[in-house]
Image: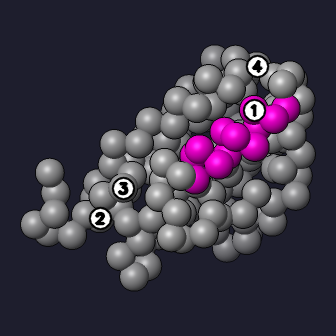
């Protein structure tokens, strides 16, 4: 999956993603699609596979690299586990290119509604929640002065 067009809102990106996946009626098929997308992702460059970018509390290695460019948030992720690579990648793709104020309250509950997270172990599900929290936290820290709510 690639980043959505930068002109689309987070809600539009999420709706497009949900629509694409609901075309696959079976939750197992949705899960398989997500994992296959992870296999197609470019790996994170070795220079970014640093302890600094490791997501804490994860039993396998998961890297999360946030960046702010031209007032917009950009995220990269990678993991040794295909499922974490898939779902953290989906979150990063949907959130990348958006202004921070669009992300501070984002709760990507669509993953649960689509039945995708139910197939993960509790610790992996919690890790995906942690990645969503990292996105929100990074965004909150980068809202321009005077625009915070």
- If you read the primary sequence from the N terminus, does the residue marked by circle 1 or circle 3 appear first? 1
Tag 3 near tag 2, CB within 8 Å: no
Q: In front here: 100 or 14?
A: 14
- If you read the primary sequence from the N terminus, does the residue marked by circle 1 or circle 2 appear first? 1
> Relative to residue 26, is residue 115 drawn left or right?
left
> Relative to residue 48, is residue 139 drawn left or right?
left
Residue at the spot of label 3: 102
- If you read the primary sequence from the N terminus, does the residue marked by circle 4 or circle 1 appear first? 1
Q: CA distance from mark 4 to mark 1?
A: 16 Å
- Local packing at callout 4 (Cα closer than 10 Å; few below 14, some 14-19, many 20+) is some
- If you read the primary sequence from the N terminus, does the residue marked by circle 3 or circle 2 appear first? 3
Q: Is residue 10 part of the magenta span, yes or no?
A: no
Report the mark closest to the observer, 3 or 2. 3
Identify the element where label 1 is drawn.
helix
Residue at the spot of label 4: 119
Residue at the spot of label 1: 22
- Spot occupied by residue 72 in the image (x, y as percentages of width and height): 41, 71
- For image coordinates 29% across by 64% down, the residue present is 142
**Would residue 11 be visible to someone looking at this image?**
yes
**Would residue 123 be visible to someone looking at this image?**
no
- Spot occupied by residue 39 in the image (x, y as percentages of width and height): 88, 52
């Amino acid at each position: 999956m690639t980043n959505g067009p930068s002109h689309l809102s987070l809600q539009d990106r999420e709706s497009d993603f949900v629509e694409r996946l609901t075309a696959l009626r079976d939750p197992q098929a949705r899960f398989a699609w997500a994992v296959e997308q992870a296999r197609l992702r470019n790996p994170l460059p070795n220079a970014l596979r640093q302890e600094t970018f490791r997501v804490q509390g994860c039993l396998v290695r998961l890297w999360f690299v946030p960046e702010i460019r031209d007032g917009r948030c950009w995220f990269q992720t990678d993991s040794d586990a295909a499922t974490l690579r898939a779902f953290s990648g989906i979150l990063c793709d949907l959130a990348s290119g958006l202004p921070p104020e669009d992300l501070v309250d984002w709760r990507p509950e669509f993953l649960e509604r689509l039945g995708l997270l139910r197939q993960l172990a509790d610790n992996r599900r919690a890790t995906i929640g942690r990645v969503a929290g990292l996105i929100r936290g990074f965004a909150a820290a980068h809202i321009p002065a005077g625009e915070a709510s």
